[in-house]
Amino acid sequence: MAHVSHSNTIGWKCMAWVRAAKCLVCFTFLLLTAEHVLLQFTGTTTSRFLLSSRGSQAKQLDPSAQDCIFTISAFNNFGFVKVFFENVRIHNPHYSCFIWVVADNSASWAEGAALAKQILDTSPSWLHVVTADKLQAFMDFSYLELAFRYDMQCFCTAIKPSAFSYIFQVFNAQKVLYFDNDVWVMHPLDEILRALDRYSFVITPHLTEPYPVDGLIHDERTIMLAGQFNFGFVAMARSKSVFVMLSWWAERLRYYGFADPHQGMHFDQNWGDLIASYFGQSEYLILRDPRYNIAYWNLHTRGDHLSMVDDKVLYHGAPVVFMHFSGMSTLESYDIEGVSQHQNRIRMSDYPHLRPIFEAYLDMLKNKNAMQWRPVPYGFKTFDNGQEVPPQMRSYYSDILDPASRARGDAQLFKATVDTGNPFALDTKQGMSLMSWMLASPHHLLIDACLAGWIPEFLWQVYRQRPDLQAVFPEPFDRNSSALVQWFTLSGPRELKLGWMVPLVLKEQAARAAREIATTPRRMGVNVFGWLDGVSGAAESSRLVYASFVAQTSRDRLPIAALLLPRTVVHSHEAQEILVTRTPQYYFNVFVANAINTPEIKASYPGAEYKDHYNIALMSWELEDFPDTWMQYVSAYDEVWTPSRFVTSSIKRSPLYTGTPLRTMPFGLDIDPRSYQADRSI
């Protein structure tokens, strides 16, 4: 029996530990090598997550969890919606929460109401259909406001955050995935769902590699304008951060969900750029794996690596998860030769190996007759009388409710007067209808013009966009107003396709003529114009003048009316207990404004109406010499008042003074006598 010494035993153990250490080093090297290969394939952020997601800390996928997949469209895209969900279900059979949010109008007055009902009645039993009105409980404003402000495509994207909120709450969803319905899901989405175990948001960038500088569309500049992340796919997991983001996002899309990349707006997705700024890196995953969201915007680098083998689409031999066929179809037809109507960089002739992929998707759509429902009229295209909403009204409605328009006097009046909750209604129970507002005289004017200077607000919006009308009718609120209205009644039906509005315009014209006969001649009294609700020295001056006339009225029974001058952005405004009107029903006008404000006053006061009044301006000035360039504004009035002899002298001293009557009229003081009573309690 061989003898083994204690020292040899120790040596053997040491050698075993060395071998184990070497194995550990080899295993670590192999692991790092594998990660390096995966990094090359998927990108740094994603690959590190994919490795760790398979570790012991990764949550097991629960087939019974309420994880939902949804898309949004109008009724006319129902064919694409069905094809989208059928593909999703083929590769994700263990999920059952599939939701179609219908961004359309199913009300009885909608033009396509009957077809809409047919679609709702024939939709698959496994598909949950949520109409836009169901989202109202998750909005702080009327969903009809969005439907009127935006066209069909913008409306579909503007309701996206509210749709997320609805699904999280009503379906008690833990994870929610949104896809555009021109997406082909080709593989299980489990990796995304596992990612949502760790992250609140999963988003995909448009680009992971640069474009060449060659003048083709798209390039990096257009991508930056459209947003660095494509929101044709976005996934969220229930969390506090998600609900904060959804509320913030919905508030932004209320006003800024339109599509104009040159203004930095591209539907809903520009706002997604701020996720990386507003949330920590542990909250979001930028999914850079090239097998996800393959589309025309990244085919310049990914297209060469795509192939179709045994009816499966592969990227570098690995299965593609989903492709996005944005811009491949119009409402009437398909075009795979140009790949997408939104670009000119990629042509099918340059990537012939892509043809089988695009043709396979096209065959799916054709086999399912996806175009069948394209003729369904968009329900929010018309007023509730079935007549189409003119684009000028949509843009006007959007602009006047924009918070950036808060200083506009007409914006304040609009919010206080019009029933903004349902702009589609021609008759409303609360407030004025939008249509009635658009038939009144333009509201940027200081007054509601009489017949001689009247054109409807709607016609003014058309006029502003038509240089040809401006050339033919240069004075729309004076000598050309009647001719401009006549042009609309004769040419509107043909040029604007708005024949249905002509009777409404003629009815309003007749009503104004009747009112004018009834109120002629003008009664004696004073119309005081000023920034009566402003927070400034000029505004306080106007209130003092108004108070002086009110005091005079109580003694001499001189009637008075208060009218607002155009608001300015630089001054604040606050509510005052002064009843204002837009009807200058009395003969005398008193404008409490300085000379420099005259051009704006004249531009917003119809000339025909201005001439029918005796016009007085109360002007202030601080220096001895009144500016020569302003003397022409002194002559624009029948009479000028000043608050002191100093100001009167500065105007009279000017060599350009033409003799306009000047009167020194100091401001009255609103004094409460009780504040001057002696305190005898001491």
Image (cartoon, helix red, strand yellow):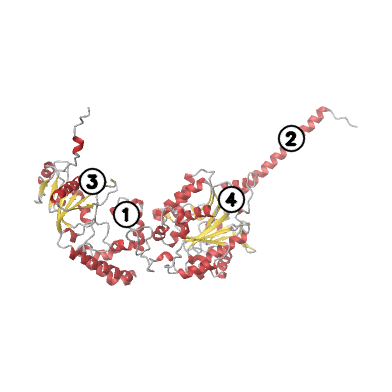
Residues at circles 2 and 3 in contact by the CB criterion of under 8 Å:
no
Q: Where is mark 4, residue-wise?
A: 42
Which circle's residue, 4 or 2, is located before the other in the chain? 2
From the top left corner, tell me how far across and down residue 61 is, in percent: 63, 51
From the top left corner, tell me how far across and down residue 286 is, in percent: 53, 49
Secondary structure of the residue carrying tag 4 is helix
Q: Where is mark 2, residue-wise?
A: 18
Which circle's residue, 4 or 3, is located before the other in the chain? 4
Which circle's residue, 2 or 3, is located before the other in the chain? 2
Mark 3 closeness class: few <14, some 14–19, many ≥20 residues within 10 Å: some
User: In this view of the protein, which residue sits in the foreground, 543 or 673?
Assistant: 673
Looking at the rendered structure, which numbered label has been put on residue 213? none
Residue type at mark 2: give it. Val
Q: Where is mark 1, residue-wise?
A: 416
Secondary structure of the residue carrying tag 2 is helix
Mark 1 closeness class: few <14, some 14–19, many ≥20 residues within 10 Å: few
